[in-house]
Image (cartoon, helix red, strand yellow):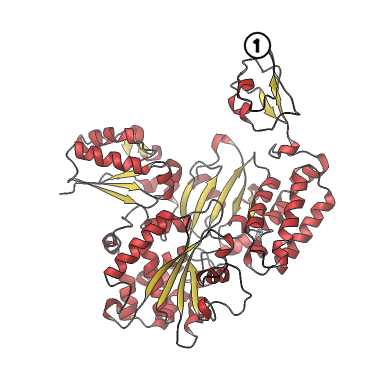
Amino acid sequence: MIRSSILLCAGTGCCSSGCDKVHDAIEENLKKAGLESEVKLVKTGCFGLCALGPIMIVYPEGTFYASVKPEDIPEIITEHLLKGRIVTRLVYDETLQGGEVSSLDETGFYKKQKRIALRNCGVINPEDINEYIAYDGYVALGKVLTEMKPDDVIKVIKDSGLRGRGGAGFPTGLKWGFAAAQPPGQKYVCCNADEGDPGAFMDRSILEGDPHVVLEAMAIAGYAIGANEGYIYIRAEYPIAVHRLEIAIKEARKNGLLGKNIFGTDFCFDIDIRLGAGAFVCGEETALLTSIEGHRGEPRPRPPFPAVKGLFGCPTVLNNVETYANIPRIILLGADWLSSMGTEKSKGTKVFALAGMIHNSGLVEVPMGTTMREIVEEIGGGIPGGKRFKAAQIGGPSGGCIPSSLIDVKIDYDSLMEVGAMMGSGGLIVMDEDSCMVDIAKYFLEFTVDESCGKCTPCRIGTKRLYELLEKVTKGQGTLADLDKMERLSYYIKENSLCALGQSAPNPVLSTLRYFRDEYDAHVVEKRCPSHACKDLMSIVITPDKCIGCTLCKKVCPVDAIAGDVKKPHVIDQSLCIKCGVCIEKCKFGAIVKQ
């Protein structure tokens, strides 16, 4: 008889922190304690608090253990599972109140979240279809096949107000309606799991923690538009997600939930996986479809749009993972349920990958209309080291930077567009006062330059020239005329590029020019970087009155740029210094600073 359950996060974040070793230690110690038949150990998907991995929750108490190491397991097994005494030193501190363990829902990280797309992540075993079914899995598919007509399904999705979560925010029901309206014949349903934004891991985490929700949603979409075949396009760099998808598809086929005559009806639908090679441009819908067809992933002119002429020239519905993850709940709970959340034009919730200079990095899902301040200060726990929030880059390389002056902006499609940013797929990178916004713009633009497919001249050449201008500025060689040229070139690239990659590539440049013009002016007029981040405009020096001559900085310098005698102030030879910053990290007296 099972009396306790241990849910261990086995998403990519916790795997990289060593959850496999923790899992082995749990199995070994359960066996030693004779508890292997009484305690169920389950590897789940992401709990969200990636900064604290590996994470495990022990039920029925609901005790949330964070940053668990293999050597901690014997104590947890002995104290908690055998003696009933919670190991408080390992408990997530926000759940401890006066020595008692409180609910996770009351913590700052979870209190304002609303998990819909992530509702099963960290709750079920993603490799067991029975656990998904136990949480109403495939009930929505059964409902549409036995109680609803295709037009009824599309109407529910339209009325819910669900917009695509891949970035553009196009109404999902409207897209499905376009495909359904095409003449009968071969049609396709595709899933965009080619998540390529730096710092983004929303779709990956859903697939790792709840792969069946995407399969069910794609089957529902297939029924709605009259398709019998689907493809999930996922990058090969997501091995855990790919593995769990393969298991899920195999289990769904075995249980008659994919394949022929699903639920005893005439509806037939199956899904295959296609692996991408990591090209960022394949996140663009036409480039993705071209890649599935076996060609180089390059965008195609639109119209015709994929709903009319898509994969192999047939009508195709293409949505991303998060969009599909909302579908089964909408079918089960109704259009009004989703439309009751969010704002007037942005319904439901949005998942964000919260990263950068923030206490609680991880995966969060909040109702549309939640402010940036709530995400950064309450859910994210604020900036480490007591430093000041400076900006947030939202929407990945295609997005824009939101400055601290706009921290109360609502996170929805229209509000973000008004301030020069965009939702994107959900990457949210927080920056503190030490970040140079010019350097940040250069970083994201360098990414898009590398990822451009090269098909159209404005993107292939324009982004390269724009990057070169930014490089001049960060080296202290730029002029005010260069800033004007950057702005003109940015608008030209946006207006003339073939696909969304080029059209949105200048966004980081334009948003930082708009909100941080003073930093650009400092780089070109004063030839200095206010944040001391641009190496060509920065020096590392030793403050004589603080240096006690301990020689530690001299010992760690990789290029022997530091000289000085024991117990006497040292100096740095600027002609040799490579500005690596190792000496600053090692100095215990704060004697070495950037200037």
**Quick check: 161 above or below 267?**
above
**Quick check: 520 above or below 326?**
above
Q: Which of the pair 564/419 is nearer the observer?
A: 564
Q: Which of the pair 238/497 is nearer the observer?
A: 238
Question: Residue 353 at what x, y percent from top left?
Answer: 50, 52
Residue shown at 74%/63% (left/top)? 491
- Please indicate, yes or no, whether residue 99 appears anywhere in the rendered image: no
Question: Residue 372 at what x, y percent from top left?
Answer: 56, 52
In terms of image quadrants, where is residue 553?
top right
- Dot 1: within a 10 Å radius of its alpha carbon, few (fewer than 14), some, or many (20 or more) residues? few
Q: Which residue is labeled 1 in the image? A: 567
Q: Horizontally, is 192 left or right of 487 in the view?
A: left
Question: Residue 381 at what x, y percent from top left?
Answer: 50, 42
Q: Residue furthest bottom?
A: 183
Q: Residue furthest top?
A: 567
In terms of image quadrants, where is residue 476?
top right
Q: Secondary structure at mark 1?
A: loop
Residue shown at 35%/81% (left/top)? 148
Q: Which of the pair 249/390 is nearer the observer?
A: 249
